[in-house]
Amino acid sequence: MKSTVSKILIACTLFCLADFSTADAKFKFTPPNPSTEFEKMDYPQVYPTYSWEPVAKTEFYQVQVVRVEGLQEKIVSDLTNSEALNRVTDWQALTQEGNYFWRVRVVDKKKRPLSDWSKKKFFSVTTPVTFAALGDSITHGGANFIPAGQLACQWETFCDVPIKNIGRSGDTTQMMVERFENDVLPFKPKVLFIMGGVNDIRGGINSGAVIKNLETLREKCLAHEIIPVFGTLTPMNEKIMRGLGIFITDGDWRGERQKINAWVLENGGVDVTQGLCDSEGELRADFTPDGLHPDLRGKKLMGEAIGKFLREKFPALTDGR
């Protein structure tokens, strides 16, 4: 009897110390809590950033984006958090109309699940739209302190005209030209707000090349019966950018920016820089975390200026807002 009890105790001890399979190990952590706020936005981004609250003692996460077609569910994106602990951006443009949900779970470095899936976060992609915005990270929602899929990271949040976000971080104006057909045309906007060139001039591309690309975008818009509206380039703070190791050319980017902004205003564009500049014409140090992207207060000023312009310029399209 004593021998039998000893065997049972040994077996129990070995069971407790065993290296469980992945199927068992996935329940080691609670599911992450999603924090993206597409359901509160007028429209989700064309390049969505999915975010969540990190789970303690974890590092890797898997995100699935699923299209719901009647009773069928189809995975359209399967992502891992390559850019930060609490977020991932899908660089595949989400342009197909329909109903979707996304979810996230904890995984190990080999993508083996360590938690159940989070709750599903539902959103819809709709077409057509009346207003859309084409741009770089300033439009997409660039900020290290807030994921781009949250309301506080978008100037559109403060624009009282619903506007589809077709921004993509890192874009030059040439890249915006190249993706026009794929990213803009599926949404058939009546008005396209275009704001780009910051990445061009901080990389040494001259104003003439930028203006040529903006003119090409205007031609593409008019060919598809879309009204183009341009926005001025936001200022930068060179000292902060260099201090953080963010690349900016040694060339005359200030002069190139002034030339581009003069062209924008001469062509009936929107000045989004009011309140953003310091006495030297650079982005206010207290309005930016990195010298390149305006913070929440800056985005608020931009959104309000753009909304005011669109309401005054297109009253028939913004009635009731």
Image: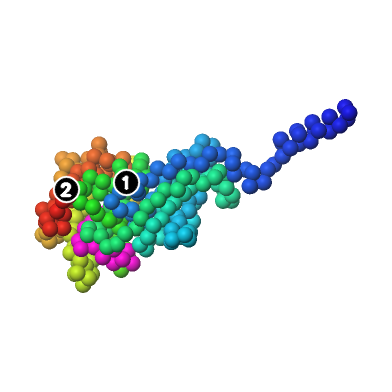
Q: Label 1 crowding class (10 Å Cα cut-off): few <14, some 14-19, many 20+?
A: few
- The residue positioned 21% from the left and 72% from the top of the image is 223
Which portion, as a residue range, is magenta?
A: 182-199
As drawn, the label of residue 40 is 1
From mark 1 to mark 2, how far is it between C-alphas? 21 Å
Please indicate, yes or no, whether residue 252 appears anywhere in the rendered image.
Answer: no
Q: Nearer the viewer, mark 1 or mark 2?
A: 1
| Proximity of marks 1 and 2: CB atoms separated by less than 8 Å | no
Please provide percent x and percent y for residue 291.
29, 44
Q: How many marks?
A: 2
Q: Is residue 316 above or below residue 105?
A: below
**First along the sequence among labels 1 and 2:** 1
Q: Is residue 161 left or right of residue 315?
A: right
Residue 301, picture quadrant: top left
Query: Which residue is disc 2 drawn over?
Result: 305
Amino acid type for the residue under numbered disc 1: Lys
Query: Does 90 lie within the magenta span?
Result: no
Q: Residue at x 22, y 70 (%)?
A: 224
Q: Which mark is residue 72?
A: none
Q: Hey, which residue is sitting farthest bottom in the picture?
A: 223
